[in-house]
Image (cartoon, rainbow, N blue to C red):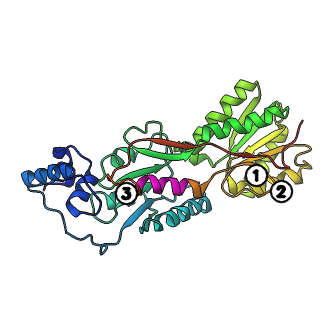
Amino acid sequence: MVRITDVARRAGVSPSTVSYALSGKRPISPETRRRVEAAARELGYRPRSDAPPHGGVKVLAVAAPLRGGTDVPAMMRLTQSVVTAARAYDHDVLLLTHEEGLARVRGSALVDALLVTDIALHDPRLPLLRSVDPPVVLLGLPADPRGLACVDLDYRAAGEACVDHLAGLGHRSVALAGSPPEVYLRETASARRLVEGFTAAAHRHGVASSVHPTEPSPPAARALADRLLRAHPAPTAVIVQNDPLLDPLLTALRHLGLRIPEDLSLMAVGTDIPPTITSVTVPSAELGTHAVDLLLRNDSGTPAPQTALLPPRLTERASTSHT
């Protein structure tokens, strides 16, 4: 059976452009439309239906797999921003939380566009995403983004900004309390890139550094606090990239008699940071809006391959001080 990708290859365009040219859902240049129609006739391609099975409603799918170590509130905050932005384009949103969700929509008329989250550096979904029919934007930056449009916070720069701030306050030993171990094992880009920036800046400043993947539970927080206190040299500042860990870690530090920031400076990188903590806040609303705009504003169908990294904004509050 002839597929839409066969027509796209013959016409020298993307599969989504073929879909738009044959359905009339978006403006396509007359020359491109003629080329697509000629390729479809030559190959004997027949669209599944003149109307999509969802009754003509425009649908944006968000692939947000719920994996081990996933910060679900942060994921939902990002998804909420996508829903809000998609409504401005008159799109409904379909949330795909299973790993096989992408396979279900591949080559189907279920969705008009696709956003993919929780990107790994060497994400096994990339070959599929480079071949699917609907246009795609990644909310995350893989090691090899060729052929794909990507939007994310510049996590490497965020890690560097945190260490730069602490080194400027005189700190000579810093620790990173990171995401759960499984997040690092699957090479989640946001976690790995922040570690890269953290380590590079520590080396540049001559600051001792250590990374501690941590489950966001009270026992794990107590074990981490005790380990930090006994380390040589003991860190005088901690950066947390793990929103659910913040409260239990603060409690554990207080139980050990440590005061913030008199005895230990504390910073965080995340989406839901208490207003007293010096932080780099992940701009979920801005990320979601930027990704949707990139995906749906493009009349040609497929966003041009590009990487948009939002610069980190560090807000200094009462949890950090000079050593």
Magenta range is 287-295
Question: Does label 1 or label 3 sit earlier along the sequence?
Answer: 3
Q: Residue furthest bottom?
A: 55
Question: Does label 2 or label 1 sit earlier along the sequence?
Answer: 1
Quarter of the image with the C terminus is top right
Question: Does label 3 or label 2 sit earlier along the sequence?
Answer: 3
Tell me if residue 249 can be seen. Answer: yes
Give the percent coordinates (x, y) of residue 176: 72, 41
Q: Nearer the viewer, residue 98 or 45?
A: 45
Residue designated by label 3: 102
Tell me if residue 100 can be seen. Answer: no
Name the side, left or right, on which 213 lies relative to 24.
Answer: right
Give the percent coordinates (x, y) of residue 38: 10, 51
Q: Amino acid at mark 1?
A: Ala
**Cα gap from disc 1 to disc 3, whole angstroms:** 36 Å
Q: Which dot, 1 or 3, sits closer to the camera?
A: 3
Q: Are marks 1 and 3 in contact (CB under 8 Å)?
A: no
Q: Is residue 294 magenta?
A: yes
Image point 56% across, 59% down: which residue?
78
Which secondary structure, mark 2?
Answer: helix
Give the percent coordinates (x, y) of residue 114: 40, 57
Name the side, left or right, on which 34 lies relative to 224.
Answer: left
**Cα gap from disc 3 to disc 2, whole angstroms:** 41 Å
- Magenta span main SS: helix
Residue designated by label 2: 251
Q: Is residue 209 above or below residue 131?
A: above
For disc 1, the neighbor class at 10 Å (few under 14, some 14 to 19, many from 20) is: many
Give the percent coordinates (x, y) of residue 231: 81, 35
Q: Are marks 2 and 1 in contact (CB under 8 Å)?
A: yes
